[in-house]
C-alpha cells in the first residue's frame, strides 16, 4: 500500500502521510518507501512511550523525510493502553522533547481546540492537523469544519502551519478548508480504493480529479491563486 501511495503522490506533486501500528515493521517499511522518493512523505508515529518513539524517530530521520507527525489523538485507541510501559497522552514537556529529537518540522495531528493548538505551539510543533481521527476515537465530537476557524484565528501570526482533515472529498471541500484559513488538507479514505483498484494510475486519477475541481471552484469564485482564497469566498 505504502509503495504505491507514497510514490504516486510524490509523482503528482503532493506528500503522502503514512501510518503506524503495533507491528515493528510498519514505520521502517514506510520510511524505506519515503526514502526512495527523496523524502517526499510524512511518517506519522503514534504516542508510544518515549523509548519506542525514539526508535521510530530514528527510522524517520534516516529516511530523509521533510517532516514527521504524531497523531496524539491516537492516545484514546484501546491498543495503546495495554502496553508495558503504557503509551498514551503526552505532556507539553514530553512533546517538546520529541520535537527536539525529531530534528525536523514536527506536526501534531489530532488538535480540535484552541487550547490544544496553543499547547502544540508551546511544545515547538511546526504545524498541527485539525483532526478528530475520522470520528473513531471519541463519539459525538465536533466536525473539524466547526472548530477550524477559531483555531486559525488563535494561531494568526504564529507561523504555525495549519492542516485539516475530516470528510474532505472534493475540490470544493478543499477550497472551503483553505477559505476558512487552513494551509493544506489531508484526504485519507478515498485513496484506499484508488490504491487497491487502480494502483499508481488510480491515485493519479483521483489527485487530478481533486485538482480539476479546485480549479473550477476557484474560477467560479473569481479567485486566481490559492493566496487569494479567503473567508469572503465561503458565501
Image (tube, grey):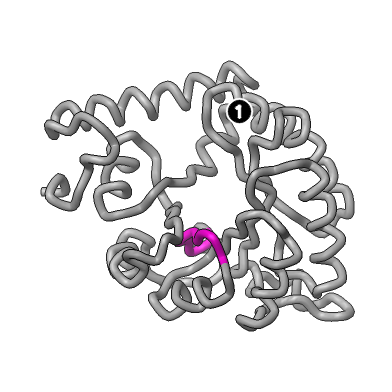
Residue 131 magenta-drawn? yes
Q: Is residue 1 visible?
A: no
Q: Is residue 214 above or below residue 44?
A: above
Which residue is identified by label 1?
Answer: 10
Point 48% across, 68% down: residue: 111
The quadrant of the picture occupied by the N terminus is top right
Q: Residue at x 70, y 37 (%)?
A: 39
Specify whether residue 39 is painted magenta. no
Give the total of numbered labels: 1
The residue shown at (25%, 48%) is 179
204 is higher (above) or lower (below) than 173 = above
Q: Is 72 positioned to the left or the right of 161 in the image?
A: right
Q: Secondary structure at mark 1?
A: helix
Q: Which residues are magenta?
A: 125-133
Tell me which residue sits at (58%, 69%) in the image. Answer: 73
Relative placement, left or right, of 115 versus 229 is right
Q: Percent x, y for residue 141?
A: 42, 72
Amino acid at each position: 500500500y505504502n509503495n504505491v501511495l507514497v510514490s504516486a503522490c510524490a509523482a503528482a506533486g503532493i506528500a503522502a502521510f503514512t501510518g503506524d501500528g503495533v507491528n515493528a515493521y510498519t514505520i521502517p517499511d514506510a520510511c524505506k518507501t519515503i526514502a526512495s522518493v527523496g523524502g517526499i512523505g510524512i511518517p506519522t508515529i503514534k504516542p508510544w512511550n518515549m523509548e519506542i518513539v525514539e526508535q521510530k524517530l530514528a527510522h524517520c530521520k534516516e529516511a530523509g523525510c521533510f517532516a514527521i507527525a504524531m497523531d496524539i489523538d491516537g492516545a484514546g485507541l484501546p491498543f495503546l493502553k495495554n502496553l508495558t510501559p503504557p503509551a498514551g497522552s503526552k505532556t507539553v514537556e514530553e512533546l517538546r522533547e520529541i520535537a527536539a529529537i525529531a530534528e525536523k518540522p514536527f506536526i501534531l495531528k489530532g488538535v480540535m481546540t484552541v487550547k490544544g493548538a496553543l499547547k502544540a505551539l508551546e511544545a515547538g510543533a511546526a504545524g498541527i492537523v485539525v483532526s478528530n481521527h475520522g470520528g473513531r476515537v471519541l463519539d459525538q465530537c465536533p466536525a473539524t469544519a466547526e472548530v477550524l476557524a477559531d483555531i486559525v484565528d488563535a494561531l494568526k501570526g504564529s507561523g504555525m502551519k495549519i492542516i485539516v482533515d475530516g470528510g474532505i472529498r472534493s475540490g470544493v471541500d478543499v477550497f472551503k478548508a483553505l477559505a476558512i484559513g487552513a494551509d493544506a488538507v489531508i484526504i485519507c479514505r478515498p485513496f484506499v480504493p484508488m490504491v487497491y483498484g487502480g494502483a499508481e494510475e488510480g491515485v493519479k486519477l483521483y489527485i487530478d480529479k481533486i485538482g480539476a475541481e479546485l480549479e473550477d471552484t476557484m474560477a467560479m469564485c473569481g479567485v486566481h491563486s490559492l493566496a487569494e482564497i479567503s473567508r469572503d469566498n465561503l458565501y
